[in-house]
Image: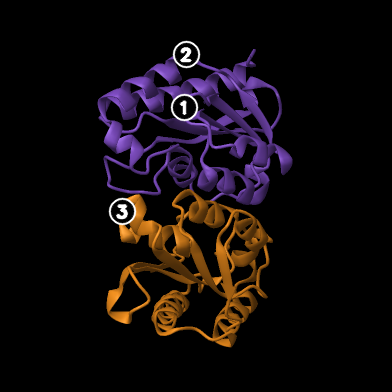
Chain colours: A purple, B orange
Amino acid sequence: MTLNNIDKLGFATALAEARKGSREGGVPIGAALVYHASSAEADCVVLGSAHNQRIQKSAPTLHAEIATIEDAGQLSADVYEKSTLYTTLSPCSMCAGAILFYKIPRVVIGENASASTGEEEWLRSRGVEVILVNNEECKELMRNFIENKPEAWNNGSSS
Amino acid sequence: MTLNNIDKLGFATALAEARKGSREGGVPIGAALVYHASSAEADCVVLGSAHNQRIQKSAPTLHAEIATIEDAGQLSADVYEKSTLYTTLSPCSMCAGAILFYKIPRVVIGENASASTGEEEWLRSRGVEVILVNNEECKELMRNFIENKPEAWNNGSSS
């Protein structure tokens, strides 16, 4: 998968968040929301980014994508409609539902080997462009987490 | 729709939250999560309740249902699996996705006349029991809000 420069920026931001989550001992999943008025790099803005905070804040719904949409704050519909959401792991049904609710038209996903929910197909069926990067570092972060904290992962964690 | 006593308690709790939201000038949607180990009333526990806080906290994702799941805190899978979510308005795709993610098997909805997302059918197709109360006060709260703050409603609000 070849990413353009805006996608590289967005994905690097999400991956940096996943690394932060890993250093904090949390679920190492990161996300970023990037607005692109056009395909020119100068026209893009990172609206928000965050990592999963389920363990750190004992907050069950603070998946990386939800926390990122929160971090971006209140936006008008036309901003979401020109944005891409980057996430290091394939989204769960709640986060996929959020992508649909906010009408974010495009999602770039780091990997779906650690947890495959099937929601990518649901997003595609509802008109969202879904791009899979298949990034090794995203998988490695998840593998280390699941090996070290299997009970935390098995009890309700996700993207 | 005839509700049993546990459902009456759960729905009354969600409706009280919607009224709180209305008094605060927020989106008047409330929710509650109730655990029921059996059908005996003594066996039920209100795990959490909340109202939409999009306006009050400038928090786009704090829909009533998401805020309620947050309010209930970290729970094990078997607790969600014996719980019902009560909400005064039919859930959006994010909140419907959360119901699926946490494997909450049953949803009681106050009304779907003010905003119909079609997600009730999606929930049913994935095995969730969906009960529509068709409550007049829920509709009245929404009607007043939309009349008084149409711009707030049209710009991204929902359940």
Left or right: residue A156 compared with residue A151: right
Q: In which quarter of the image is residue A125?
A: top right
Q: Name the residue under label 1.
A: A14
Q: Name the residue under label 2.
A: A136
Between B65 and B63, the one lying in front of the other is B65
In which chain is the residue bearing label 3? B
Query: Could you give the CA–CA distance between mark 2 and mark 1, rounded to whole angstroms?
Result: 14 Å
Identified by mark 1, the residue type is: Ala
Q: Residue B123 in the image: x percent, y percent? A: 60, 58
Left or right: residue B21 compared with residue B43: right
Residue found at x 27% / y 79%? B42
Report the quarter where the N terminus of chain B lies. bottom right
Q: Identify the secondary structure beneath mark 1.
A: helix
Report the quarter where the C terminus of chain B lies. bottom right
What crowding class fits label 2: few (fewer than 14 Cα within 10 Å), some (14-19), or many (20 or more)? few
User: Residue A6 bears which disc, if any?
Assistant: none
In which chain is the residue bearing label 2? A
Q: Residue A89 in the image: x percent, y percent? A: 49, 29
Q: Name the residue under label 3.
A: B75
Q: Residue B53 in the image: x percent, y percent? A: 44, 63
Q: Do labels 2 and 1 share a chain?
A: yes
